Image (cartoon, helix red, strand yellow):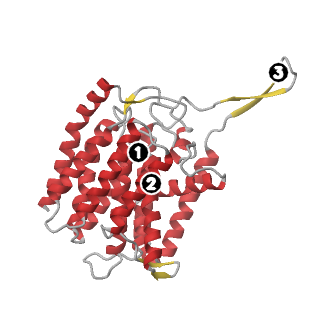
Amino acid sequence: MDNIILSFGLAFLITFFAIPIIIEVARRKKLFDEPDERKVHKMVIPTLGGLGIFGGFILATLIGSPEGSHELQYFVASAIVIFFLGIKDDILVLSPAKKFIGQLIAAGIIIKFGGVRIMDMHGFLGITVIPQVAGIVLTLFTVIVIINSFNLIDGVDGLAGSLGLLTSLVFGIYFFYAGQLLYSVMALSLAGSLVGFLLYNHSPAKIFMGDTGSLLIGLINSILVIKFINIAGSQSVPVPLEAAPAIGFAILIVPLFDTLRVFALRIFNKRSPFSPDRNHVHHFLLQFGFSHRKITLLCVGSNIGLLLTAYFLRSFGTTIVVGILMIVSCAFTAVIYYSRPKKKVTEMKDTNTKMPVVKYRKMTPVIPNSVEVN
């Protein structure tokens, strides 16, 4: 218990006191996230908040982790790969191909050396134990999707950080009661760092986490959710859970479902899954004129509601619970999409050609501050 309190508190303090220094350095060196055709925010804002999150998380985890945590060295190595990947993208901008290769390297480290691997589907679609090669491929896909899910949901002030705080708290509390001290320390170190960061990231944000922060949150959550599925699905642990994969999916459902949906739409339209657009759920909510704070509260509240749904329905089995979560998520997204304010179309005559000209008048208010199109 002392390790956990120490890790959470230390991570919070390091990040909380580091962020103002990072903001000042970014201003002096002109390291800003500048508005362009991909972004809606109107002000230049420092985008290196991930530095503070990374520093708080790494130091608190290394100090608070129990002795004999041999896999921790590989988790830290993977986090360092993600850190340099994110910091270079925040400052110089990386191509999607180079970004993807870096993510593959980080995922390969935790899979090959860290023992992070999906080995059992726990009855999902009638599948239990899976072959080693299939497990590695599935794990690699899962890690890459989760890493990108927090990166892509980071489009509204406080959203990615608040969702990351929710997931890390849930994992941290579970692993504590399950007797998995290392993973509890990792989760609550991340939670402490995010609390310290969010004090500066609430709308209107003073700083963004950038890819350095969002990719790190995704990486750590990918490790935690796979370990959660393997541990919670075992009957030999102090707190076993039925339908562990479904509950793990529910913990991450808002960023994970939104990313899977957007990736599927982009591939269906014959575009790269990493190409930017405005099809994320927070873009739809902005069209209602919701503030960043309301969008964050709505998304976090929805995530909590779906998590509780999965927990109380866990006796129905993994397949049924996952199916219910997907149906509810699809229905919720469809309601938002089809009920959002539309552009009003008016037709006019061009005075030179006499041909009809379509003009659009937006019916929505000006979108506030700091939305990024991913």
Q: In the rendered structure, which amino acid carries the disc numbered 2?
A: Ile
Spot the residue most to the top: 351
Please name which of the two marks, 1 or 2, marks the residue nearer to the observer. Answer: 2
> Label 1 neighbourhood size at 10 Å, few (<14), some (14-19), many (20+)?
many
Residue at (43% x, 44% y) in the render: 154
Q: In the rendered structure, which amino acid carries the disc numbered 1?
A: Leu
- Residue 277 seen in the current view: yes
User: Of marks 1 and 2, which one's residue comes earlier in the chain?
Assistant: 2
Q: In the rendered structure, which amino acid carries the disc numbered 3?
A: Asp
Is 314 on the left or on the right of 170, as rendered? right
In terms of secondary structure, where does tag 3 sit? loop
Q: Which residue is mark 1?
A: 159
* Mark 2 to mark 3 CA distance (whole Å): 50 Å
> Label 3 neighbourhood size at 10 Å, few (<14), some (14-19), many (20+)?
few
In terms of secondary structure, where does tag 2 sit? helix
Please name which of the two marks, 2 or 3, marks the residue nearer to the observer. Answer: 2
Residue 32 occupies quadrant: top left
Residue 188 occupies quadrant: bottom left
User: Of marks 2 and 3, which one's residue comes earlier in the chain?
Assistant: 2
Q: Which residue is mark 2?
A: 101
